[in-house]
Amino acid sequence: MWVRMNVTVVVPSPLRGTDPDSFAERTVRERWPRIVAQTIRENDFPEAVNERLWALHRELPDGPIRPIQDPGAPDLPLWDEWVAPYLGETWASAPWLFTEHYLYRRILEATGYFQPGPTYLHDPFRKQKTEALDPAAEAVIVLARAANERATQPELARAQLPLLVRTALWGNQIDLSMWSAGEAPRHLGTDRETAHLLADDTDALLAHLEAVAPARIDLLADNAGFELLCDLVLVDGLLAAGYAHTVVLHLKAHPTFVSDAMIADVLETLDVLAAAPDPAPRALTERLRGYLAAGRLRLSDSFIWNCPLPMRAFPKLPLADLARSNLVIAKGDANYRRLVDDAHWPFTTPFAEVVGYFPAPLLALRTLKAEVVVGLDEARIREVAAQDPEWMTNGHWGVIQFYRPAR
Ligand SMILES: O=P(O)(O)OC[C@H]1O[C@](O)(CO)[C@@H](O)[C@@H]1O
């Protein structure tokens, strides 16, 4: 069992949609209304649902936060508790981490996701998710072929782990604005790719994996589609390398952040890969299904991963469960924001200081899509900001950050 550091840190104020000229402000005022309108466009909802979605659209950004109104929904008691501190605030004034999770839950309230009827458990973002993985794309085939080679060669899997970690990192850049899906594997390991890493704790991660007995690794998944494929390839590599006996993939219990993965998305991804024209993705799928059948890969979902709380404020149980892990891999921007309180930390605050509350070894793989980050070097920040004014939000820059508590 890992021991949590008993240090008190003063957490700075959270990001809010009222922060002037911030990405949070732009999100609350422009991006969210667009997402709600797009949800209406991409679905063939009954008129009553569309009216509710338009009503939600009109609330943004200055309407008040109110309780979730979704009688009988399984997460309703949880939301009553989570919303309580912010009643009376507005979409813009409440903490952004809260409002963003609340928005996606309000979308599901409007669509009737948890209500009996034609839209029960209908994923309103399904169209975008299914478009995000082309099983015949060159990148998919390249990744699957390499994975199949590693599968029977633990030494090769260990040697290639840094590459797998970076593949999973850049997979988080699912808008693929830095390179296209076909290009990505070819760029891994190039100067251009490494130049875009703002922090790289890969050596510390490898030392940790070599030092601990293979047991359980947990991955907090982010987006479905290409990113999920990269994550599954990382999982496959960790198992092939002998670094893990079991991997637990933690998924969202309901649709959120448009493309976040649920158990259904993992199963669908495997179905899509199983039907690929090339044999390599099919072999990868067969192996992953074998791991699932043997209990070496477990899919777990929970409303905790849809909750609007920073990880520091999580209830005891999920953290106690993660404390049994030899490594927790947190994927993506939203998980990173959750880890670091989505707060205005000075960017040079040491990562270990901020996540010192975390009960297990932790690896954050995240491309920057929000104006929050820790553990950076002052000179590097100046250099990157001069080179790319949008560096904090355009997903072109990434961090590989590792933290290990005491035993
Ligand atoms: O899929 P990710 O990497 O968690 O990103 C979530 C996105 O949503 C946001 O939280 C804002 O809507 C951004 O910070 C980020 O671009």
Image (spheres, helix red, strand yellow):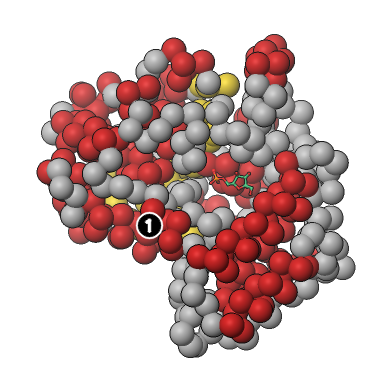
Residue drawn 75% across and 33% down?
Answer: 345
Q: Is residue 151 left or right of residue 192?
A: left
Q: Kindly tell me whether residue 120 is visible in this rendering.
A: yes
Is residue 356 depicted above or below 388 in this figure? below
Q: Is residue 73 left or right of residue 161?
A: right
Three-letter amino acid code at disc 1? Thr
Q: Nearer the viewer, residue 50 or 381?
A: 50
Is residue 97 depicted above or below 407 in this figure? below
Would you call the spot at circle 1 few (<14 residues within 10 Å), some (14-19), or many (20 or more)? Answer: some
Residue drawn 64% across and 43% down?
Answer: 337
Residue on which the image places disc 1 = 130
The answer to which image quadrant residue 352 occupies is top right
Residue 31 in the image: state x and y as whole percent: 67, 51
Residue 276 in the image: state x and y as whole percent: 19, 49
Residue drawn 29% across and 24% down?
Answer: 160
Secondary-structure class at tag 1: helix
The answer to which image quadrant residue 79 occupies is bottom right
Is residue 116 depicted above or below 272 in this figure? below
Residue 320 in the image: state x and y as whole percent: 53, 53
Residue 61 in the image: state x and y as whole percent: 79, 59
Whether the residue carrying mark 1 lies under 8 Å from ligand 1 is answered with no
* Total marks in image: 1
